[in-house]
Amino acid sequence: FDNNAVFFSFNAKEGIDNPAMVITDDTAHPRLCVLKREEGESYGFYLRMEKEQPGHIIRKVAPGGIAAYSGLRDGDRLLEVNCCFVDDISHQELSGNQLSLLVLSEEEYRLCKSKEYDFKKLPMVNKSECCKPPRLCHITKNPGSGLGIAFAPVEGQKGHFTVNLVAGGAAEKAGVFKGDRLVWMSGAIVEDLSHSAISTMLKKCGSQITILVVDAESEKYYNSQGIPILPAMATTHNLPYTARKLHLLPGKDGYGFLLHLERSPSGRVAYVLREMVSGGPAEKAGMRAGDLLLEVNGEAVEGLKHEEITDRVRQSGQEVTLTTITPEGLDFYTKVGSSSQLYYCNGHKPVNLIDHITNSHFDCLQ
């Protein structure tokens, strides 16, 4: 962007002198960039909030990396994450192994900002009223009626499957509706599977299964816009694990627990809560030995050094809030590609947390 470019002033009575400055649907062209990575792999870009610069800014896109391959460019402004509008959020943080990012070029973003344009009115941002988020539903088998669900291929649409339910059955109670479209099941995207493969997975799932579904009209809209339907976009129903927030008041000897950096058998490195002092603040707050630490006072600890975390705890004053989850819970959310942290957008959508913080205010490495 040329900092020496001339900006035309707008006067509501006189109109816009330069026709090129009129904001129309043809002026702003949001781009949808879909990123997918393996566990522990970097997306290859920075997300920044820079002083005296509006918006969430994409920086340092690594040549040949996942972000570059998806179409992200240096200077792009982030508008949406997994269909959740974030431009009006003061600090946006990202994680997860699948992301759908809606961005606008730096030039178009500045132009819209100079005219106080409402980004939510852009076509790709202004979703159809009939478009609803997908639902991530965890079904526990009923001893009498089983899972209470079956899938049938949609005629003439390869890789599309509709849901049939047992009225009042386990699936219906878990938030699944008759006529829903199946998107994802037990870690697999169903558009890559045959009907027989899905039926086999259903039979072998044991007593529980997690599926991602969406209503037919919303699926049609997402497909028409080229928007991938991801677990991270979903509202959640009946999930078996939740993160816990613990509020600790310091005692005369501290908080009464130890924090260890440990590697699990699967290779995941995490901060583990250990050695609660009997009757101490941690035990009184409900801390459980072996649980994993996700956040300190609402800030993610992933990527931080041990001393950075302990400093944050010590500097908390009269109370510290820790967000924790069981190892099984973190494995579950990692598998489904969603966030275990209790962060929500518009009341229900999870906004995932960052992978690593290089500067807690302005520079987030993705």
Image: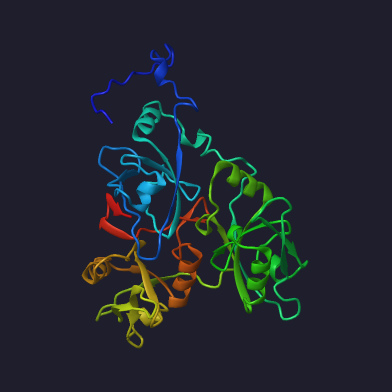
Q: Nearer the viewer, residue 251 or 166?
A: 166
Q: Residue at x 56, y 58 (%)?
A: 235
Q: Residue furthest bottom?
A: 278
| Residue 171: % across, % down | 69, 68
Res 194 → quadrant:
bottom right
Instruction: Work out which quarter of the rendered image holds the N terminus and state it.
Output: top left
Residue 281 visible (yes or no)? no
Q: Nearer the viewer, residue 307 or 192?
A: 192
- Residue 124, relative to residue 141: is it above or below? above
Q: Residue at x 74, y 62 (%)?
A: 164
| Residue 176: % across, % down | 67, 62
Specify whether 312 is left or right of 219.
left
Q: Nearer the viewer, residue 62 or 327?
A: 62
Residue 187 visible (yes or no)? yes
Q: Residue at x 43, y 16 (%)?
A: 12
| Residue 156: % across, % down | 72, 50
Q: How is the image coloured?
A: rainbow
Res 184 → quadrant:
bottom right
- Residue 358, relative to residue 308: is it above or below? above
| Residue 306: % across, % down | 24, 71
